[in-house]
Amino acid sequence: MMHPASSIDFSASKALCEQYATSFSMAAQFLPEEKRNAAYALYGFCRATDNITDSRKTAPQKKKELAEWKNELHAAWDKGQSGNALLHAFVRVCEQYAIPPSLGFALIEGLEKDLQHVRIANFEALHDYCYAAGAIPGLLMAFALGAEKKSHPYAIALGIGMQLTNILRDIKEDLQLNRIYLPQSELQQFGITEHAIAQGVVTPAFVQFMQFQIARARSYYAEAEQGIGLLPEEARPAIYLCLQYYREILSAIEAKHYDVFSSRIFVSDARKREMAQFHTLYQQA
């Protein structure tokens, strides 16, 4: 029997969200409490899975940990509970909002494939990775928000846009883990070598490459924005702000003249609060 949401401890999930996803966490404040807690639970599971793949352990070690995590998820679904607070909250929320179990397993399996591919051949392959890492979390949220099925393609677009943005922001950090998510075919098209990326020099070719990539990410946000009106009214401000916060990262990259190497690019909390206030006033007008 499903436990009521009030019996779930969301503190571990919330802590992960506040630690790793300040934009998402700030946007979630505009959700009703029950939906906000659900968002924390879904994010907590996704983040914990991602943390396994992002560790500095060897690929075989990470593969083993992902397999163990997958087995724990199976057990949580079988028992309807888990001693792991993150998995317990995740499974309970999935039950509460009729989220298909397959989505959680698809996330793990999609990220597991990433362990064997530290170079991405082309955008088609990158899109597949972004679907696992970004679109699946977007679909999880769509279910939790009670969004109609016709809104799911827009949730997928938002998830892919956010993942593409993360990739552009984190080029330096990913390279330190021996990962380059930028499509190799497009790097070659712009005449950019792996050595040049490792040097961290912003060349004219790199600027053109980044402009091309940013335009693509923005196209996904533009598509996702069309689906905001399909969401339940109470969910629209949070999702719209999340979209705006991530789209603002692209503007921050441009403001730094595409130098994603010198320091980590981010949108300040003050700027996010300013954007939230403007959005709130706009909604009231």
Image (spheres, rainbow, N blue to C red):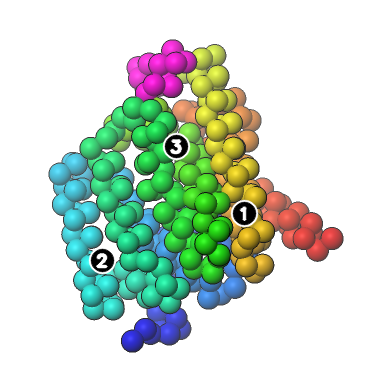
Measured Cα–Cα span from mark 1 to mark 2: 31 Å
Q: Is residue 97 above or below residue 241?
A: below
Q: Which mark is residue 73?
A: 2
Q: In the image, 127: left or right of 152?
A: left
Q: Is residue 10 visible?
A: no
x 19%, y 41%: residue: 59
What kind of residue is marked 2? Leu
* Left or right: 134 as drawn, with respect to 49: right
Q: Secondary structure at mark 2?
A: helix
Within 10 Å of disc 1 (Cα), the crowding (few <14, some 14-19, many 20+) is some
Marks 1 and 2 close (CB-CB < 8 Å): no
- Image quarter of the N terminus: bottom left
Write the start and end of the magenta stretch as one range: 184-198
Q: Which residue is mark 1?
A: 227
- The percent coordinates of residue 171 (x first, y second) are 42, 32
Specify which label sits upstream in the sequence, 1 or 2: 2
The residue at which mark 3 appears reads as: 167
Which x, y percent locates residue 23?
55, 53
